Image (spheres, rainbow, N blue to C red):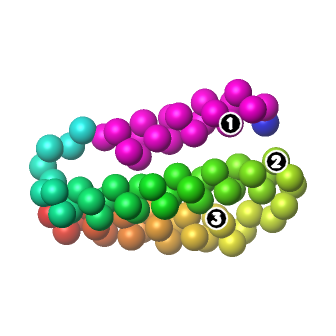
Protein backbone atom coordinates (compact mmCIF):
# COMPACT_ATOMS: atom_id res chain seq x y z
CA UNK A 1 0.00 0.00 0.00
CA UNK A 2 1.39 3.37 -0.90
CA UNK A 3 1.38 6.41 1.36
CA UNK A 4 -1.21 8.08 -0.87
CA UNK A 5 -3.61 5.15 -0.69
CA UNK A 6 -3.25 5.03 3.10
CA UNK A 7 -4.06 8.71 3.41
CA UNK A 8 -6.96 8.31 1.02
CA UNK A 9 -8.32 5.38 3.03
CA UNK A 10 -7.96 7.30 6.30
CA UNK A 11 -9.77 10.28 4.83
CA UNK A 12 -12.61 8.04 3.69
CA UNK A 13 -12.81 6.50 7.17
CA UNK A 14 -12.88 9.94 8.78
CA UNK A 15 -15.67 10.99 6.44
CA UNK A 16 -17.55 7.80 7.09
CA UNK A 17 -17.22 7.67 10.87
CA UNK A 18 -16.66 11.23 12.06
CA UNK A 19 -18.46 13.42 9.57
CA UNK A 20 -21.85 11.74 9.48
CA UNK A 21 -24.62 14.32 9.67
CA UNK A 22 -27.34 12.43 11.48
CA UNK A 23 -29.56 14.89 13.37
CA UNK A 24 -31.58 12.39 15.37
CA UNK A 25 -29.04 11.97 18.19
CA UNK A 26 -28.77 13.97 21.40
CA UNK A 27 -25.53 15.70 22.38
CA UNK A 28 -24.66 13.08 25.00
CA UNK A 29 -25.40 10.33 22.54
CA UNK A 30 -23.32 12.05 19.87
CA UNK A 31 -20.32 12.32 22.16
CA UNK A 32 -20.47 8.57 22.87
CA UNK A 33 -20.72 7.78 19.18
CA UNK A 34 -17.92 10.17 18.32
CA UNK A 35 -15.58 8.63 20.92
CA UNK A 36 -16.27 5.15 19.56
CA UNK A 37 -15.66 6.34 16.01
CA UNK A 38 -12.36 7.97 16.95
CA UNK A 39 -11.22 4.76 18.62
CA UNK A 40 -12.23 2.88 15.51
CA UNK A 41 -10.15 5.18 13.31
CA UNK A 42 -7.14 4.74 15.59
CA UNK A 43 -7.47 0.97 15.35
CA UNK A 44 -7.82 1.16 11.56
CA UNK A 45 -4.60 3.21 11.41
CA UNK A 46 -2.83 0.65 13.56
CA UNK A 47 -4.16 -2.14 11.37
CA UNK A 48 -2.83 -0.42 8.24
CA UNK A 49 0.56 0.05 9.89
CA UNK A 50 0.71 -3.62 10.86
CA UNK A 51 -0.24 -4.71 7.37
CA UNK A 52 2.50 -2.54 5.90
CA UNK A 53 5.03 -4.10 8.24
CA UNK A 54 3.57 -7.55 7.49
CA UNK A 55 2.65 -8.18 11.11
CA UNK A 56 -0.28 -10.24 12.32
CA UNK A 57 -3.47 -8.16 12.51
CA UNK A 58 -5.72 -10.73 14.17
CA UNK A 59 -5.82 -8.99 17.57
CA UNK A 60 -6.53 -5.62 16.00
CA UNK A 61 -9.20 -7.12 13.75
CA UNK A 62 -10.88 -8.60 16.82
CA UNK A 63 -10.78 -5.23 18.61
CA UNK A 64 -12.24 -3.52 15.54
CA UNK A 65 -15.03 -6.06 15.31
CA UNK A 66 -15.84 -5.66 19.00
CA UNK A 67 -15.80 -1.87 18.75
CA UNK A 68 -18.08 -1.93 15.70
CA UNK A 69 -20.58 -4.03 17.63
CA UNK A 70 -20.41 -1.59 20.55
CA UNK A 71 -20.91 1.31 18.15
CA UNK A 72 -23.98 -0.33 16.65
CA UNK A 73 -25.37 -0.92 20.14
CA UNK A 74 -24.76 2.71 21.14
CA UNK A 75 -26.45 3.91 17.96
CA UNK A 76 -29.46 1.69 18.65
CA UNK A 77 -29.90 3.16 22.15
CA UNK A 78 -31.49 6.33 20.81
Give the residue displayed 34% in from the left and 39% down from the top. 19
The reply to whether the C-beta atoms of the residues labelled 2 and 1 are less than 8 Å apart is yes
Q: Do the residues under discs 2 and 3 have CB atoms within 8 angstroms?
A: no
Q: Which residue corresponds to mark 2?
A: 52
Residue farthest top in this picture: 4
Q: CA distance from mark 2 to mark 1?
A: 10 Å
Assign the N terminus to one quadrant of the image. top right
Residue located farthest toward the right when viewing the structure as drawn: 54
Magenta residue check for 12 = yes
**Residue 75 pos. (x, y %):** 26, 61
Q: Which residue is mark 1?
A: 6
Q: Secondary structure at mark 3?
A: helix
* Residue 8: quadrant of the picture: top right
Left or right, 51 with reference to 10: right
Element carrying mark 2: helix
- Residue drawn 21% across and 43% down? 22
- Please tell me whether mark 1 sits on a helix, a strand or a loop: helix
Q: Residue 61: horizontal and vertical position, in percent? A: 64, 64
Instruction: Give how far apart the Cα atoms at labels 1 and 3 are.
Output: 17 Å
Which of pointers 2 and 1 lies earlier in the amino acid sequence? 1
Front residue of 75 and 45:
45
The crowding category of the residue bearing disc 1, from other C-alpha atoms within 10 Å (few below 14, some 14 to 19, many at least 20), is: some
Q: What is the number of the mark on residue 61?
A: 3
Q: Which residue sits at x=27%, y=59%?
A: 31
Q: Is residue 52 magenta?
A: no
Residues packed near mark 2 inside 10 Å, few (<14), some (14 to 19) or many (20 plus): few
Q: Residue at x 31, y 59 (%)?
A: 33
Q: Is 12 above or below relative to 34?
A: above
Amino acid sequence: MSQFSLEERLNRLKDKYLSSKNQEFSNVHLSKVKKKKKKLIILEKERCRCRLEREDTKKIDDKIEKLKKELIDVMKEE
